[in-house]
Amino acid sequence: MAALRIPATLRRKPGLCGAGMRRAACALLVAAGLLAGLSAPPPAAREGGRSAILLQVADAIGPATADYIIRGLETAAERRAALVVLRLDTPGGLDGSMRAIIKAILDSPVPVVTWVSPSGARAASAGTYILYASHVAAMMPGTNLGAATPVQLGGGLPFGGGGEKPGEGGKDDAAAPKTAMEKKVVNDATAYIRALAELRGRNADWAVQAVREGASLPAREAVEKGVVDLVADSLDVLLAAVDGRVVKLRGEDAAVEARGLQAVEIDPDWRTQMLAVITNPNVALILMMIGIYGLIFEFMNPGVFFPGVIGAICLLTGLYALAVLPLNYAGAALMLLGLALIVGEIFTPSVGTLGIGGVIAFALGAAILIDTDMPAFAIDWPVIAAVSLLGLGFVLVVMQLAVRAHRRPVVSGPEEMLGASARVLDWQGAGGHVLVHGERWQAVPADPAAPGNATLQAGSAVRVAALDGLVLRVVPLGPGKP
């Protein structure tokens, strides 16, 4: 990297700011140079058009995957790469994330080659749609695609991993959805994949069969039936096979120039990795609970700040994660009800009625919160059990504190005076003054007809029986009593 040169105006004339300003300017220039060097693309990318960007997906399609692929395509366009190779191995994923990826592929100015690899990989469910949307669809020997029937559980239109229960998913069952909602979902998915197949000139009939009947194909048969374009067992073979192919880029014909390309792999950065972590429903649920309990502790002990700050950050992060996942609103409502009941137990102790009911409502809501049957986007039962037990423990602690507070003697207010021992300071006839807790009070007999009143004199021991305004009603204590 060329040496940085400081302008002459900074070397001469210290001016009003002197040497401090020169040192600050030099530090800023050095920092700018270092950032420019770190952010500069590799040599293959700077050549413009002579690199192939490699992206790799080996998990369920979700918000983090969509962000990674979309940003990878944007990077390829900025670097003027000749080609993008998407290595795909997925059991399926979420409908919203899948459609975002497909939109980015269809709008990409760089040809996208989706390659199902390595051997043993699959492009099931949502992966089949992405494969159909790509400019070139390729597979490695020993891979398969299909099982693209959408799984609808009530709202999110998630795409499952293609797993069928024994005795289900046959032609008769899949071809005839049982409810109006299932018909709408299947028809929408059928039209979508047929449109992609017609756009890329691939087998539309088999695509419909994959949606309606959950059909699957291995790599060789997929090529024979026109579902994918080619089979390649290595990246070099793949690049050689796609070289010279004519594809549609934004509605115009373009030839793929893949010969002599240098592969540049783009790994998920910290943003994608963080998004993958927080959009895990288990993590999102734990973050929400940390946030809620942190805010509760802050409200119970104002001024501590640490629980409130951590709680607010975790709660907002968890809510963001849940916002990008397919939610079941009944589950969300049950969770909110459960939290409200738990908080109500704190301020209105009900000997556990509100708290235990809140824990049960929260556990039921968490179990049905995520509206998908994809294992990668389901809340694990151990996590639900752990969070519920934590809530139950919190309720038990509140109950214990409430019972202790109830049993503890009153230490302030008029009620604290009842039963207190006092000493007579002076007594004449039907009244006098007594000393209680170091204070001088006016006192009268609680029962004027009691025979012991006649024995009251200075130094006699009495007990407070009642409080009438600022006058104590007392009863004498027998000899020897405190």
Image: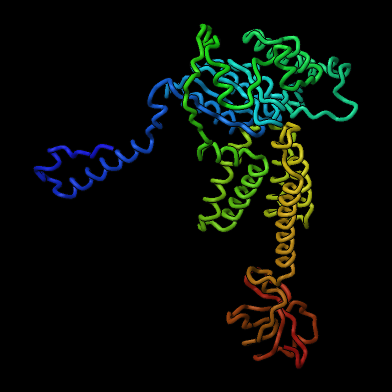
The image shows residue 161 at horizontal and vertical percentages of 74, 29
Name the residue rendered at 55%, 46% in the picture: 312
- Judged from this view, the residue extending furthest toward the right is 167
Front residue of 325 and 159: 159
Name the residue rendered at 78%, 57% in the picture: 351
The image shows residue 459 at horizontal and vertical percentages of 65, 91
- Colouring scheme applied when the structure was drawn: rainbow
The N terminus is located in which quarter? Answer: top left
Name the residue rendered at 63%, 45% in the picture: 288
Front residue of 376 and 311: 376
Q: Quadrant of residue 242?
A: top right
User: Is 41 situated left or right of 425 in this image?
Assistant: left
Front residue of 463 and 384: 384
Residue 329 in view, yes or no: no
Q: Quadrant of residue 4?
A: top left
Name the residue rendered at 88%, 25% in the picture: 168
Q: Quadrant of residue 321?
A: top right
Front residue of 434 and 258: 258
- Judged from this view, the residue extending furthest toward the bottom is 480
The C terminus is located in which quarter? Answer: bottom right
The image shows residue 434 at horizontal and vertical percentages of 63, 83
- Judged from this view, the residue extending furthest toward the left is 13
Residue 316 in view, yes or no: yes
